[in-house]
Image: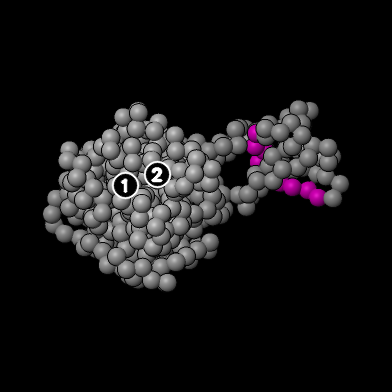
Amino acid sequence: MKKEGSKEGKRVKILTDKQEFEGILIKSYDIKIVLLKLSSGYNIGIEKAKIKKIQVLEKKKKEEFKPKLIKPKAGLPGIAIIVTGGTIASRLDYETGGVKALTKPEEIIAVAPKIQEIAKITTIEIPFTVMSEDITSEKWKKLAKLCERLLNKKENKGLIILHGTDTLHYTAAILSFMLQDLNKPVVLTYAQRSIDRGSSDSLLNLTCSAHAALSDIAEVMLIGHATTNDNFCFALRGTKVRKMHTSRRDTFRPINTKPIATIHEDGKIEKYSEYRKRNVGKVKANLVFDDRVSLIKFHPNSSSKIIDFYRKQGYKGLVIEATGLGHVSTEGKKSWLEAIKRAVKSGMIVCFAPQCLYGSLNPFVYSALRKLYDSGVLFLKDMLPETAYVKLGFLLGKERNKERVKELMLKNLVGEYNPRLTFGDFLV
C-alpha cells in the first residue's frame, strides 16, 4: 500500500484473484484488513493477504463536502432548526472511518435541500453539539429554553430538532414535560446513516419533518422512517416512543399506542390519534430536573443492595423496570421487598415501570404484587421506563410536596399513559 501511495481518503481500485473493488480507503483498526467505502455508501473489509494490487485512481487526499443550496421560494412559511449533534448532523471522516459533525448552516440545509421548497429556514441554532449518549439534564434545560424562545417568535410556524438516536426518546419525553402550553409543532428527527451513504435516511426524515413542523399538530413528536423503505414517516408522540433497533432506519416505534400520523414526502398527512392542536398561546419552558433519580432493571438473582445504595446516597426517586405485571423478587435471600420498604420509609419515591414495554402493570393479580403495592410502590401502568425516569426527575424538580409528586406520577399529563390498550397497539 505504501508503494502505491494509497492513504485514507483516496479513491482506489483493489484487485484480488477473483474480484476487483472501487471505493475510498477508510482507516482500518485491524492490521490484516483493508477497509473500503463503496459508491453505494456501504463499507467492505478485504483481507490484505488476498490483495494482489491497489491502484490509486485520484490524487485528492479526501473528498470534500460541498453543499449545494437551493434558493428558497418567496412567501414560504418559516421554521427554525436546532442542531444538537448525532449522525443526521454528521458526515464521514475518511481518515478515521468515523463521522464528524457538520458545523455550518449551509451544510445542515444541504442534507435535505427539499426543505427549502417547503419552508423558509428562519434560523439554525446550535446550542451544543454532542453524540446523544453524552446528553445531560443541563443540556435538556438549555434546549427547552431555546425551544421556548423560537416557538414564541411569530415568524416560526414550527421547530425541527436534529438529535442522535440513542437517547432521542429521553429528550422527546423530557421536552414533552418541560414545554408547558405548547403552541406549535416541535419535531425531533434523526438519521441512522450519515449523509455520505446512499442508504441515508436523513433526506426523507428531514423532508417529512418540515411538513410536520407546518402541520396543526402542536405536540412534541419524533419523525422518522415508518418502514425500511423510503416511502413515508411516522409522527410519534414524544412520551410513547422508543428506539427498538440498533441500526434499522425504522428504529423508532410507537409503544402501546398508534402513531399520531403518517407523513409522506409530498406533504400528505394521515392522522390516527388525538393530539393537541396549534394555537395562538405562548409556550413556557419549565426548566427543572432533579438529578437524584435513577432507572434500574430488576433481573433474576439481582441484589436488593442497589436500592439501599441509592437510598444512602440521598436519591429522591427510583424507577425500577419490573418483570411481567410488576414483579420483583419478594421471597428468599434475594427479595427486594424489605429494601423497597426501607426506601419508601426514608421518603424516596419508588416507581415500577414495565420491563415488557408493551401492556400494563397490574398490582392486584398476584399476592406478591399486592405486597409491593402495600409497601408504597407506584405502579405506572403502561408508561415507558425512560418516560417514567424523566417524568419523575421533572416532577421532583418542580414540586416540593412528595405526595403531590406521587399524585402527578399517576396522572396523565402529556399522553404518557394510554388509558385504553388494544391488541392493535402491539408491535405497530
Disc 1 + disc 2, Cβ < 8 Å: yes
Q: Residue furthest front?
A: 332
Return the x and y of residue 18 as percentages of the image width and height: 84, 50
User: On screen, 250 above or below 316?
Assistant: below
Mark 1 and mark 2 lie on one chain; the one further toward the N terminus is 2
Instruction: Kindly state the secondary structure of the residue where label 1 is placed.
Output: loop
For residue 375, the mark is 1
Q: Quadrant of residue 183?
A: bottom left
Closer to the camera, 127 or 408? 408
Q: Is residue 354 above or below residue 147?
A: below
Residue 49 placement, left or right of 308: right
Q: Does residue 146 show up? A: no
Identified by mark 2, the residue type is Leu
Residue depicted at x 83% and y 37%: 49
The residue depicted at 44 percent of the width and 66 percent of the height is 426
Instruction: Give residue 163's position: percent from left, percent from top.
Output: 40, 44
**Is there any visible trace of residue 349 in the rendered image?**
yes
Q: Quadrant of the N terminus?
A: top right
In this picture, which residue range is highlighted in magenta? 19-27
Q: Is residue 292 left or right of residue 163?
A: left
Where in the figure is residue 31, as x and y percent of width and height? 74, 31
The quadrant of the image that shows the C terminus is bottom left
Q: Which numbered marker is on residue 29?
A: none
Q: Is residue 417 above or below residue 164?
A: below
Mark 1–mark 2 Cα distance, whole angstroms, equals: 8 Å
Could you say which disc has been placed on residue 337 in the image?
A: 2
The local crowd at label 2, few if under 14, some if 14 to 19, many if 20 or more residues have their Cα within 10 Å, is some
Residue at x-position 57% and y-position 53%:
198
x%, y% of residue 236?
A: 36, 59
